[in-house]
Image (cartoon, rainbow, N blue to C red):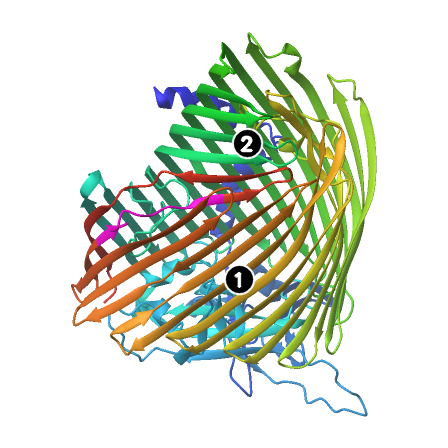
Amino acid sequence: MRVMALIPKFNGFLTQAISMNKLFILFFFILPVFQRAFAQEINITGKIINKDTHKPITDGTITIYSAPKKTYVTFSDSTGRFNFPLYLYKRANNIKIGGLNYIDFLIDNSISIDTLRKNSYFLGEYQISAKNLVLHEVKIKKKRYNDTTRIDLSKRVFERSVMVSDLFSSQMGFSKDAKGQLYFKGKAVSDVLVNNGSFFGKNNMDIYSLLPALVINNIEVTESDIDSVTNTTMLRPTVKVNISLKDKFNKGKFGNANIGGGTLDRYLVNANLYTYRDKEQFSISANSNNVNIGDNLIGQPIVKFSTNSNYANANSLKLFYRNILFKKIEIEFTVKGNFENKDFRSESERQDQTIDQFSKVVNTIRSKTFGISETGFSLNYKIDPLNTIAFSQKLEYNKLKETDSLNYNISFNGNNTVSQQFKNRNITNYLLSSKMLYSKRFTSKKGRLLTIDINKDNYNPETSEINDVVNLHNDAFSRYFVNGRRHADESDITLNTNFTEPIGDASNIVFFAVYKTDHINYQSDIDSDTIKAELNNLFKVSNQYYQSGIKVQKTFDKISLNGAVSEILNLRSVSGTAYDAARYFHINSSVKLDYKINSKKNLLLDFITETHYPDINQLTNITNTFDLISQMNSNVKLIPEQKTSIRLEYNIKKTDQERLSFTGGADYFRSKFGSNITYTPNGIQNFFLDNIGNSKSGQLGFSIFKNITDKFYLNYNSSISYQETPAIVDRALFVNNGVNLNQSFSTSKEIVKSVLSITPVVSFFFNKSYYNSTSSVITNIIYSDNIAVNLYTIQINLYPYANYNHSITNNLSFSMNAAIKKNILKKYGTLWIQGYDIFNSFKFNNNYAGSTYTQSTSYSNLNRYIIIGFSLQFNNMK
């Protein structure tokens, strides 16, 4: 029945996909013709290296001439390899190889086709010499470079239990910060590739904890200050890591699995399988658990606390496929389905500061969620080295069924209201996004680039609910119902063009233009014996956006300058309300200045003026649910918000393992989005998003990270901020404001070598908010740790957690999780036993300071339980 219910949605999905201007259908009809053509095309390959260093030359230029005319240009990749069609070789009378700061070299094109066929159409490996530059009183301000560090592991013999992630250590020049960012000799790594391509997703760092290190032939770390797109010099070099696999391991299978069961019916079943062959990759992940471990567990499960409810039964299945066909077409497909049941209880206390109203709500919720997420298809077709077409499509679908039982206790001006509300709610969200991108490079100038892309998005949210309310106000009893349905249909198309023109080696200019059309159809129906029918809405909002502008980038000896300016014209029309049409014109600009004081210090300045256009969730009340405290209404008159911000950042890198950062910034808003609230004594307050006026905010921050050894680091962050949150209450403007203070410290230290280590984290948060005539204070202090003890072949982990909350109520608690595990099967398997909340004492309050109120919410959590399980890593690499 559930599948049958989804058929109309997927019929709509197919209809909208087909309506994508029929262009995508034509694309797939002619794809087989292209495939047959690709299968028949033969390419000649070759390789160019530096004659002196014998390293491959990246972005070398290969030019083919027929008579005096230049007929074809291609470039070498990061391995120095290049290719071009065989038919061009037959017609060529000259083939020239060159490169930036290299002497041109003519290829002998007299080799017969038969000889090439015997050599698998490999033309040869060519060594070209770098130019000897003679300087005549010329000062070189900036030297372009593209350096590669090669870590040869071809003769290293690793145990099968040693993973690739284990090699990202200081012994190899790598390090990681507390957030998991990978560094090489103190410089952030932007990309990690395998055989010069993505490996089960772009920069999927988790995968390397399952891939054995014995498959690696070498690791190449390339550092370059040359932008790969614009060919201009950058002040901050990019660092990329490429892992080359040994030939015998160009295919393989690996993965992991977890299984466990425990008291209170706790259970866990999880498995991940990854398989690859050359460029083809396939993976499947399956998960079912009710112990709050997420839905994509790589490695062993770790019991952990959740600040909201962690009483959920989660199930998911994910498939991934990637391949490169005919050396020209890259395809990638992902689909993920998930189903979750959640059953929990929450208790909220809210103080409305402006009207001095206090409310307490106890909510018992049972929900079921079915979703399709992370689902999409992409196809990249490399027509030739200069032209590329890419098509992608993404689908998101989510359906929530929820049953709530709410108990209210509201106190206002000496009056007390006790209410009970029973709610059944269904929420559906559907999003289909399609994109086609065409990119063209030019032989006349390296770095010149034209891109044209068209995007089409369809978003359909829908909410329906049934409410039955019982009130007791000052001994007066009442009962009423409120039923409602809200539905929206948003469709937009965006056309975006960019033309990049390099200006020398150190600068470029980009001209861009954008056209976007957006249509929102919204309908809200209320059926009630109490609520007025005028709350019903039926309107259509249409927007057209015209944007054009330029971006400029310039790199000096120690300064990098990026600037942009654009104009945006927004034409809005509304039908179904008294508000007809409007026109908005804005100018956006940005300036980014990066000053490299020396090799260890740099200063970064950012200045931005930008316009925020209201989206469907701000123009309508599609996300609203009936509540006895506050209700949100639609506002199609909401105009764009303008923001001007400035950021300053000063960084010091004392060593490759020690970094300091000082930050500061300020924001100024005009026509700021905020709440316009109307209070009804002893009734429900109504609000909508409005343009409140002007406001400002500011921030100061400091951070330090020091990696002393692989097993000892220090990380400290501190910030203070000021923020204004204006609101309109009963037509009066209140500019409320608040101050936030954040502190956090974390470290990891091996106390006794190979026996005892700790990983403590301490955080402190303080907020003081000032309202019209009152103020509120929120304080939160948290200590957590991972105390690891190794006794022979057994590891014991203790996870203490202490927190102090001060807001409307106070809370102080200490709790602990624990785990014991033992490695077996040569460290490929682990037996473990874990205990959740062994003192049965975990409590936590989520505190929030709004523009006119403060709120504190606590959630029910799991009781103490023990779970026993087994984890296994597997692969077929030997």
Could you tell me which quadrant the C terminus lies in?
A: bottom left
Q: CA distance from mark 1 to mark 2?
A: 31 Å
Query: Residue 356 or 381: which is nearer the viewer?
Result: 356
Could you tell me which quadrant the N terminus lies in?
A: top left
> Under tag 2, what secondary structure?
strand
Task: Answer with left or right where residue 141 lies relative to residue 300.
Answer: right
Point 29% across, 53% down: residue: 301
Task: Answer with left or right where residue 579 lies relative to residue 863.
Answer: right
The answer to whether residue 540 is magenta is no
Point 47% across, 32% down: residue: 397
Query: Residue 95 or 51: which is nearer the viewer?
Result: 51
| Residue labelled with disc 1 | 743
Residue 646 screen position, x and y as percent = 74, 59
Q: Read off the magenta span.
A: 834-846
Q: Quadrant of residue 873?
A: bottom left
Residue 431 screen position, x and y as percent = 54, 33
- Residue type, mark 1 in image: Gln
Q: Nearer the viewer, mark 1 or mark 2?
A: 2
| Residue labelled with disc 2 | 358
The local crowd at label 2, few if under 14, some if 14 to 19, many if 20 or more residues have their Cα within 10 Å, is some
Point 60% across, 61% down: residue: 719
The answer to whether residue 839 is magenta is yes
- Identify whether 364 is placed above or below 509: above
- Residue type, mark 2 in image: Phe
Q: Earlier in the sequence, mark 1 or mark 2?
A: 2
> Under tag 1, what secondary structure?
strand
Q: Quadrant of residue 102?
A: bottom right
- Identify whether 327 is placed above or below 841: below
